[in-house]
Image: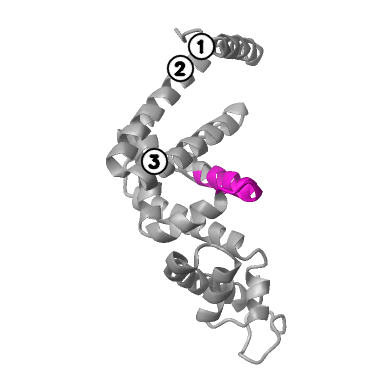
């Protein structure tokens, strides 16, 4: 992040406790402008430059603040929506919710947070859907899933830590796609079906005696599915 400065001061010319605050405030302004401009400019380098200028930043400052341009903006927006979802979820009493309900509430809150900026999210989703940006899309999905699992009380430190986040990231991403393409009712139905599948998988996985047993059973399951067998 660049350090705080007066208008005519070099970008790295001042250090101090306010540098981080200045950068955070600048990021917020740029993202606000990007969300406003995205429906017209789409999600690209042109948007990043226009948003920075609209936020009062020079081209040099913008390059330091957002070196990856639209990719950095996508990350900022995703983190904003993560934070908004967690703020909405903070008032829930987890002790009264089963894990299935926690997952449903968490994913729903995250999607509703994104829908407050729906037009911009659509543009960013198209940007992230390209092969060159797939690693960023996966990283942001993982971060969102991690935030939701931590809110839900997950404390797993073994392989379950990773599998849970990979699965929830996929559920979140696919449910978001359904919401954008088909609306809330179908997205809710899709999410409920996916959660049911996840719960069945977790129950099946828990029945395995050991990690090696799980690997053997998973290999057998995948083999049966490959050749058209039904999952009993």
What secondary structure is marked by label 1?
Answer: loop
Q: CA distance from mark 1 to mark 3?
A: 32 Å
Residue 85 place in picture, x, y as percent: 40, 51
Q: Residues within 10 Å of mark 2 (few under 14, many from 20)?
A: few
Quadrant (top left/top right/bottom left/bottom right) for the N terminus: bottom right
Report if the CB atoms under discs 1 and 2 are less than 8 Å apart. Answer: yes
Tell me whether circle 3 and circle 2 mark residues in contact (CB < 8 Å).
no
Q: CA distance from mark 1 to mark 2?
A: 7 Å
Say above or below: 121 vs 60. Answer: above
Q: Is residue 29 magenta?
A: no
Mark sitting earlier along the chain (1/3): 3
Q: Which mark is residue 59?
A: none
- Classify 107 as above or below 15: above
Quarter where residue 68 is shown: bottom right
Q: Is residue 16 visible?
A: no
The location of residue 151, given as percent across then percent down, is: 44, 43
Tell me the quarter of the picture where residue 212 sits: top right
- The residue segment tinted magenta is 129-144
Which residue corresponds to mark 1?
Answer: 207
Tag 2 residue: 203
Residue extending furthest toward the left: 185
Q: Residue at label 3?
A: 178
Question: Which quarter shows the C terminus?
Answer: top left
What x and y, as percent, mark residue 27?
A: 54, 70
The first of marks 3 and 2 along the sequence is 3
Q: How is the image coloured?
A: one colour
Q: Secondary structure at mark 3?
A: helix
């Amino acid at each position: 992040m660049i350090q705080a400065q007066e208008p005519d001061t070099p970008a790295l010319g001042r250090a101090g406790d306010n540098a981080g605050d200045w950068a955070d405030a600048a990021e917020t302004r740029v993202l606000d402008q990007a969300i406003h401009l995205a429906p017209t400019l789409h999600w690209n380098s042109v948007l990043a430059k226009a948003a920075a200028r609209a936020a009062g930043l020079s081209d040099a400052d913008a390059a330091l603040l957002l070196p990856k341009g639209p990719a950095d903006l996508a990350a900022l927006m995703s983190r904003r929506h993560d934070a908004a979802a967690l703020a909405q979820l903070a008032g829930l009493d987890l002790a009264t919710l089963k894990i299935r309900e926690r997952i449903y509430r968490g994913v729903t809150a995250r999607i509703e947070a994104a829908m407050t900026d729906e037009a911009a999210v659509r543009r960013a989703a198209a940007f992230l859907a390209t092969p060159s940006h797939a690693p960023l899309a996966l990283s942001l999905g993982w971060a969102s899933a991690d935030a939701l699992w931590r809110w839900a009380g997950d404390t797993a430190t073994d392989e379950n830590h990773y599998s849970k986040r990979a699965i929830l990231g996929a559920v979140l991403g696919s449910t978001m796609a359904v919401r954008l393409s088909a609306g809330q009712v179908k997205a809710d139905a899709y999410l409920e079906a996916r959660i049911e599948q996840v719960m069945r998988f977790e129950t099946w996985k828990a029945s395995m005696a050991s990690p090696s047993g799980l690997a053997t059973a998973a290999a057998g399951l995948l083999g049966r599915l490959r050749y058209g067998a039904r999952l009993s």
